[in-house]
Image (spheres, grey):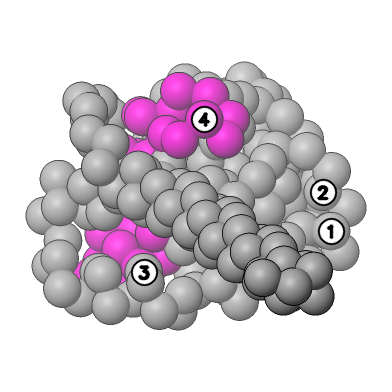
Amino acid sequence: MSKRQELREKRARQERNQRIMIIVGVSVVALAVALLLILPTLQPVGNIAQHPAMNRPQVKFNAMGNPNAPVKIIEYSDFQCPYCGQFVLKTEQQIIDAYIATGKVYFEYHSFGDFIGAESVRAAEAAYCAGDQEKFWEMHDIIFANQTGENVGAFTDKRLTAFAENIGLDKAKFNECFTSGKYANQVKQDGVEAAKAGVKATPSFVINGKLLEGAQPFSEFQKEIEALLKQ
């Protein structure tokens, strides 16, 4: 064999080895991506905590109470926010009993966009999708009851879908809404409106145009509402 032929064969072997290495590298990357996509779907849903029953009057989608009430409260919240969960658990029912059920306050819940992260967005979308089946507040409650931390996988799509089943939603209708991103723009708009209102943290409440920040005790809401009712 001539020296020229030996060089040609050596180059050919090198090119084959390079192609093999490229194929192996691409395969490894593809496998890693596939595992990242598949593993979350294989993880068990785990236990689903239940929230204490809430008595909400005149519910319509993400709102409750008389739309013509003299006081309107808009809450900007994040499903991953622990202080938002505290408000629901400790204060909301008191406001409902004293003012919403008596026709004095109209209350709306809105998300704060992606304030804490992607799981905040998907949780908000899931709640709005539940609203299509008149169970916004049931989804709202079960999401808050299952907080475990921020962006730690508590509100994966799989878990949120499990919540939907747990509260008795039509699975096919919910999945159609949730997977299509029907309310993605609504969640983004929530964030825009919150920023316009001066919201910088969650929970925050716009009470007839005045901003009240934080998971305040019932007495603080009572003071604001009573002052407005006297006007």
Disc 4 designates what residue? Answer: 152
Q: How crowded is mark 1: few (under 14 residues within 10 Å), some or many (20 or more)?
A: some
What amino acid type should be assigned to the residue bearing mark 1? Ala
Q: How crowded is mark 2: few (under 14 residues within 10 Å), some or many (20 or more)?
A: many
Asked if the residue at tag 3 contacts the one at tag 4, i.e. Cβ–Cβ closer than 8 Å, the answer is: no
Task: Determine which of the numbered discs, if any, sits on residue 199 in the image.
Answer: 2
Residue extending furthest front? 1
Disc 1 designates what residue? Answer: 195
The magenta stretch spans which residues? 126-154
Q: What element carries label 4?
A: loop
What amino acid type should be assigned to the residue bearing mark 3? Phe
Of the image marks 1 and 4, the number of the one nearer the N terminus: 4
* Percent position of residue 148, x then y: 45, 23
Q: Which of marks 2 and 4 is in front?
A: 4
3D distance between C-alphas at marks 1 and 4? 26 Å
Q: What element carries label 3?
A: helix
Disc 3 designates what residue? Answer: 178
Up/down of 61 relative to 141, above or below: below
Give the residue drawn at x 15%, y 65%. Answer: 171
Q: Nearer the viewer, mark 1 or mark 4?
A: 4
3D distance between C-alphas at marks 3 and 2? 27 Å
3D distance between C-alphas at marks 2 and 4? 25 Å
Q: Is residue 62 visible?
A: no
Asked if the residue at tag 4 contacts the one at tag 1, i.e. Cβ–Cβ closer than 8 Å, the answer is: no
What amino acid type should be assigned to the residue bearing mark 2? Val
3D distance between C-alphas at marks 1 and 3? 25 Å
Of the image marks 3 and 2, the number of the one nearer the N terminus: 3
Asked if the residue at tag 1 contacts the one at tag 2, i.e. Cβ–Cβ closer than 8 Å, the answer is: yes
